[in-house]
Amino acid sequence: MSMIQGKTGEWEVVIGLEVHAQVIAESKLFSGAATAFGAEPNTQVSLVDAAMPGMLPVLNEKSIEQAVKTGLGLNAKINLNSVFERKNYFYPDLPQGYQISQYLEPIVGEGALTLDLPDGSVKEVGIERLHLEQDAGKSLHDQHPSQTYIDLNRSGVTLMEIVSKPDMRSAEEVGAYLEKLRSVLRYLGTCTGNMEEGSMRCDVNVSVRRPGEDLGTRTETKNVNSIRFAKLAVEHEAKRQVAAIEDGGEVVQETRLFDPNKGTTRAMRGKEEAHDYRYFPDPDLLPVVLDAGWVAELKRGLPELPDAKKTRFIADFGLSAYDAGVLVAERETAAYFESAVAGGGARDAKQAANWVTGALFGALNREGVEIGASPVDADKLGGLLDLIQDGTISGRIAKDVFDAMWESGKDAAAIVEEKGLKQISDSGAIEAMLDQVIADNPGQVEQFKSGNEKVLGWFVGQIMKASQGKANPAMVNQLLRKKLG
Amino acid sequence: MAVDKSTVAHIAKLARIRVPEARREALAGELNSILGWVEQLGELDTKGIAPMTSVVEVRLAKRADAVSDGGCRDKVVANAPESEHGFFAVPKVIE
């Protein structure tokens, strides 16, 4: 737990998050219009989404399935009866004048998410609920000096609003929550988690209190569109609230906007009556009734999720909690690692983990390539691991071979053959090199004889240089001691 | 539940309906008599009776997830007072 140091003592920050996750589906929640990102304005709009008079909503069964899957992935209670209600407000990008949402009876109830914190520890954060609702259209304010342009392509797309309990206590935990939630959604295939495209958006609820006291008044900050911004919003808002209270003022319950350019929050104007949404059950829609057998079937069909995979990686491969956490964060990375370890003979899993999180991640980040498109695929990396394991090449040479594989897309064995990179493990050849170096450097030999052990490293360096890195380091060390004996 | 003049003004504002001051008193009376009539339902003893959402036993209709609509921009913006580059164009609204 991290505290905020104010002028008058320590303060505890209490944070809850509301995440809007766009459901992966071909068509919208209540209409058959397409959901693909980036289409020409208003080309993916049905007359239902434009709220033309007399149009009626018809529920997309995939939206229900995705919400239930997500609920199961969050170990949450699935409500077999849920109700769509109308949330009434006026805004230009909401043609109906109401959003169809769920209020008193959401489709998913309480659950939990386990956070993997940077120090390797874990923390459980409660999930309050998950409900389905329609997304609004998009307003573009910067295209015309006096007009706002409205695109309804997003209008009616299915959103899952996932509400956490106020269980987080620092910006770091907020980051870990969003990363873990995104990971679970991607494993389940229910949301792309792409915050840049707005398919995952987040509202941040923050309050502060003296340790042990009751909850303070909270503010809700909207417009937070990346994990980094969520952390900034928490830090700024907590400091602002502490300063307000310590200066003799108070925190006003209000909706605030995050300013990504300044990393600050500011109050929204004219929202005093905005929270009077007058919810009532949508008369165009009957309650959603689920079959318990169908829910059980979905549960049996769930993929292995990150927490279970992490536990298995630690148990089966002997990985550290940290390495296992890094490898399971993305489903594709975990699959890559597993197939790199699985092939060939008995590959060293820890070594494989180091190569994936080291050289491979380094190259992927540098070149901006997704793991699925890596020129060094899992089989090829496995081949490289085999060559290290059987002593064909040294670990040092392996780095060069990896770079050559990345450039050419060739197999490790082919590159080693082509470039003559095989490790020299022939004791005769190594001894000849050693004799030469010893003969050429009597001064260093003298130093060693007078007790300077450090000079051994210098000799090893000379041999590696002479062999262009190909000499087997273990053998060099062994033979060197024998010769200098 | 009783509605007074200020409630009438509040509801009218939320619904974006202009109700002149002179009409509010009368409207409060009308709304109260409608609410009073509906409240007669409260006299019924509904203990132990599950809420009913339809007079016939039907389940909510669902559709398969397929693209079957959209691609009719001209119809969508046909009634817009103003439209530019395929967008609806409205007076600037920004925080």
Image (tube, rainbow, N blue to C red):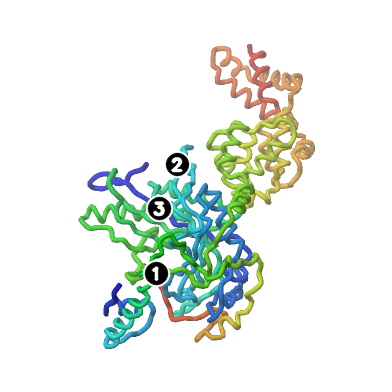
* Residue type beneath disc 3: Gly
As helix, strand or loop, the secondary structure at mark 3 comes to strand
Residue A16's disc number:
3
Image height of A107 relative to A470, above or below: below
Q: Which one is nearer the viewer's eye here, A311 or A68?
A: A68
In this picture, residue A85 sits left or right of residue A5: right
User: Going 27% across and 84% down the picture, which residue do you hit?
Assistant: B25
Circle 3 marks a residue in which chain? A
Q: Where is residue A163 in the image (x, y as percent from the top left)?
A: 45, 55
Q: Position of residue A400 (x, y in %)?
A: 68, 38
Per the model, the C-alpha gap separating discs 1 and 2 is: 35 Å
* Residue type beneath disc 1: Tyr
User: Going 49% across and 75% down the picture, which residue do you hit?
Assistant: A96
Residue A123's disc number:
2
In this picture, residue A282 sits left or right of residue A434: left
Q: Of circles 1 and 2, which is in front?
A: 1
Going from the N terminus, do you reach mark 3 or mark 1 first? 3
Looking at the figure, which quarter contains the N terminus of chain B?
bottom left
Q: Where is residue A396 in the image (x, y as percent from the top left)?
A: 65, 33
